[in-house]
Image (cartoon, rainbow, N blue to C red):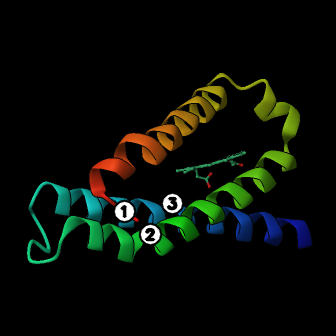
Amino acid sequence: MGSTWLVSIVELSHLLGLTILVGSVVVVSLRMFGVVMTRMPLSEVAGELWNWALFGLILQLTSGVLLFMSEAVRWYHSGPFLVKMTCLFLALLFHFTIYRRVTGRK
Ligand code: HEM
């Protein structure tokens, strides 16, 4: 009973982190394409939302590790999980190199 609640809370955190992270990335991307907040420089929008994106990412990483640990052998042998981790690694690499340079975030 207790652990069922705990797993639900961790899964909820995983989805909350996803919402915060994707939400902030989408707003910066829409600004990049000139759809929203056009009177604000892109670097400023990216800078203002960076703390939210980082908070979402940290929530994703910590809750993700906890979810992984709950059934480590299952996820270790899962093909889709390997694909997800590879995509996550590539996304982080892209973000901290090209995307960061394009947005001009300090
Ligand atoms: C930006 C990064 C990430 C995103 C967008 C993301 C997204 C998701 C989504 C949408 C689900 C399905 C919803 C759910 O079952 O609660 C999920 C499940 C899961 N995630 Fe992540 N995730 C991320 C990072 C991670 C990391 C870093 C790990 C582990 C090291 C991880 C481990 C898991 C596991 C084990 C599940 C399956 C939970 C279950 O069905 O019991 N995730 N993730």
Tag 2: Cα neighbours inside 10 Å, few (<14), some, or many (≥20)? some
Tag 1: Cα neighbours inside 10 Å, few (<14), some, or many (≥20)? some
Q: Amino acid at mark 1?
A: Arg
Contact, mark 2 vs mark 1 (Cβ under 8 Å): yes
Residue at the disc numbered 3: 18
At which x and y percent is residue 102? 28, 49
Nearer the camera: disc 2 or disc 3: 2
Mark 3–mark 1 distance (CA, rounded to whole Å): 21 Å
Which residue is at the front of the view, 93 or 56? 93
Above or below 81: residue 11: below
Nearer the camera: disc 3 or disc 1: 1
User: Would you say 101 lies left or right of 36 here?
Assistant: right
Tag 2, which secondary structure?
helix
At which x and y percent is residue 28? 28, 62
Q: Amino acid at mark 3?
A: Leu
Which residue is at the front of the view, 39 or 29? 39
Residue at the disc numbered 2: 50
Which residue is at the front of the view, 59 or 100? 100
Q: Amino acid at mark 2?
A: Trp
Quadrant of the image containing the N terminus: bottom right
Does the beta carbon at disc 3 come under 8 Å from ligand 1? yes
At which x and y percent is residue 82? 65, 27
Mark 2 vs mark 1: which is more N-terminal?
Answer: 2
Mark 2–mark 1 distance (CA, rounded to whole Å): 8 Å
Q: Residue at x 18, y 57 (%)?
A: 32
Above or below 30: residue 87: above
User: Would you say 101 lies left or right of 64 here?
Assistant: left
Residue 1 visible in the displayed image? no
Residue 105, disc: 1
Quadrant of the image containing the C terminus: bottom left
Residue 22, disc: none
At which x and y percent is residue 76? 80, 29
